[in-house]
Image (cartoon, helix red, strand yellow):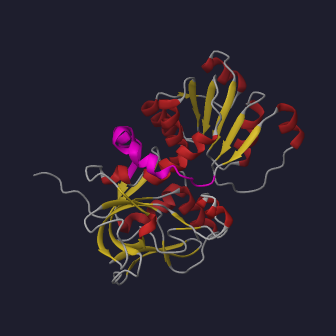
């Protein structure tokens, strides 16, 4: 079978490898139907920060169909369509015991500690699999995991009035804007240097596009206070600019993967009562995100950037790393749909 495997920083190859055999006890073999490329995949490709095995099959945003069961598996059945939880937790540390698996002391991720979904088949622990409605489009199902990440960030924000700003219209920022557009009572704003991408997010969600400028934001919101924001770029410069335009008493959910270190005066946070909220992966939001897929299918499909095959993944990494996209998500479809005659 074909698999896109990461050998080291900047070294991603599509290989022909043996298909997995009979699953181990508690594990399940899937036919992968679709998978999404995540910003953390690109970060790992550029930096090698999370390479613990080489080569390893990348891809933690995946949906598939169960084709074989290991002994002891009774939570899924052959033929079930499933979405994978990306988090590989130990189940033994204090955080896991408290139900905070996303903060597991030895947390790893699918595509890192075990092979992931950029392959025709994958083998995963049954505990990570969630059965989905067979009618859900596979492209939509592949977006359940990033939708859960966005939902976690949105839920970390306090309930507030006024306006909320999402900085960065990549996958997580765009999905956060989508969720906020359906749950937030005030004005939803988005900002991104990629004008085509912010325009698509605004068109799908109804959010208003703004520059990171206090006057521009005041004009877009009728001077309502900016008390909540989502930082989804991982840019130190964008973070500092965002911090300067937030109103006092605001909360900032930080979900981007940063490159570099922050240099801020902590008295700024104390005196202005600004709360910085770290948002790591997701907690218990994946089942809720899966429940939303049917309702959100149309906007999720409208936010897809491109649909590609396995052989196209290395080129997609290069394109996305260069910022060449006007949508949120590149979806890998293992079997391209047949055009009607």
Residue 127 x %, y %: 45, 67
Q: Identify the residue at the far left of this view.
A: 341
- Look at 34% across and 38% down and name the residue there: 298
**Is the N terminus in the top left, top right, bottom left or bottom right quadrant?**
bottom left
Majority SS type along the magenta span: helix
Residue 222 x %, y %: 63, 15
294 is higher (above) or lower (below) than 132? above
Residue 90 placement, left or right of 300: right
Residue 14 x %, y %: 41, 74
- Magenta region includes residue 290: yes
> In this view of the protein, which residue sits in the foreground, 68 or 146?
68
Q: In which quarter of the image is residue 243?
A: top right
> In this view of the protein, which residue sits in the foreground, 35 or 182?
182
Residue 101 placement, left or right of 328: right
262 is higher (above) or lower (below) than 208? below
Q: What range of the chain is rendered magenta?
A: 280-306
Q: Is residue 170 visible?
A: no
> In this view of the protein, which residue sits in the foreground, 150 or 324?
150
Residue 163 x %, y %: 62, 25
- Look at 26% across and 69% down and name the residue there: 78
- Magenta region includes residue 35: no
Q: Quadrant of residue 29?
A: bottom left
Q: Is residue 31 visible?
A: yes
Residue 106 placement, left or right of 264: left
């Amino acid at each position: 079978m074909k698999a896109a495997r990461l050998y080291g920083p900047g070294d991603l190859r599509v290989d022909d490898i043996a298909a997995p055999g009979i699953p181990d006890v508690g594990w399940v073999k899937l036919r992968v139907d679709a998978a999404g490329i995540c910003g953390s995949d690109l970060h790992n490709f550029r930096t090698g920060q999370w390479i613990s095995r080489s080569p390893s099959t990348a891809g933690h945003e995946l949906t598939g169909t169960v084709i074989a069961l290991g002994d002891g598996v009774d939570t899924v059945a052959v033929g079930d369509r499933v979405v994978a939880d990306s988090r590989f937790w130990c189940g033994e540390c204090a955080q896991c015991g408290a139900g905070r698996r996303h903060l597991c002391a030895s947390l790893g991720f699918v595509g890192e500690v075990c092979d992931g979904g950029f392959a025709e088949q994958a083998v995963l622990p049954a505990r990570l699999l969630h059965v989905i409605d067979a009618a859900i489009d596979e492209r939509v199902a592949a977006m359940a995991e990033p939708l859960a990440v966005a939902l976690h960030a949105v839920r970390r924000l306090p309930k507030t009035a006024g306006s909320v700003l999402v900085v960065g219209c990549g996958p997580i920022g765009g999905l956060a804007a989508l969720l906020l557009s359906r749950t937030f009572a005030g004005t939803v704003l988005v900002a991104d240097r990629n004008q085509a991408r912010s325009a698509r997010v605004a068109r799908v969600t109804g959010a208003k596009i703004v520059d990171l400028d206090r006057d521009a934001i005041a004009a877009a919101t009728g001077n309502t206070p900016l008390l909540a924001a989502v930082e989804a770029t991982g840019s130190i410069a964008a973070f500092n600019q965002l911090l300067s335009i937030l109103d006092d008493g605001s909360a900032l959910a930080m979900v981007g993967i940063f490159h570099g270190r922050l240099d801020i005066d902590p008295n700024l946070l104390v005196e202005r009562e600004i709360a910085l909220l770290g948002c790591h992966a997701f907690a218990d939001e994946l089942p809720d995100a899966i429940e939303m897929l049917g309702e959100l299918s149309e906007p999720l499909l409208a936010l897809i950037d491109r649909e590609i095959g396995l052989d196209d993944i290395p080129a997609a990494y290069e394109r996305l790393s260069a910022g060449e996209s006007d949508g949120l998500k590149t979806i890998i479809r293992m079997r391209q749909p047949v055009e009607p005659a």
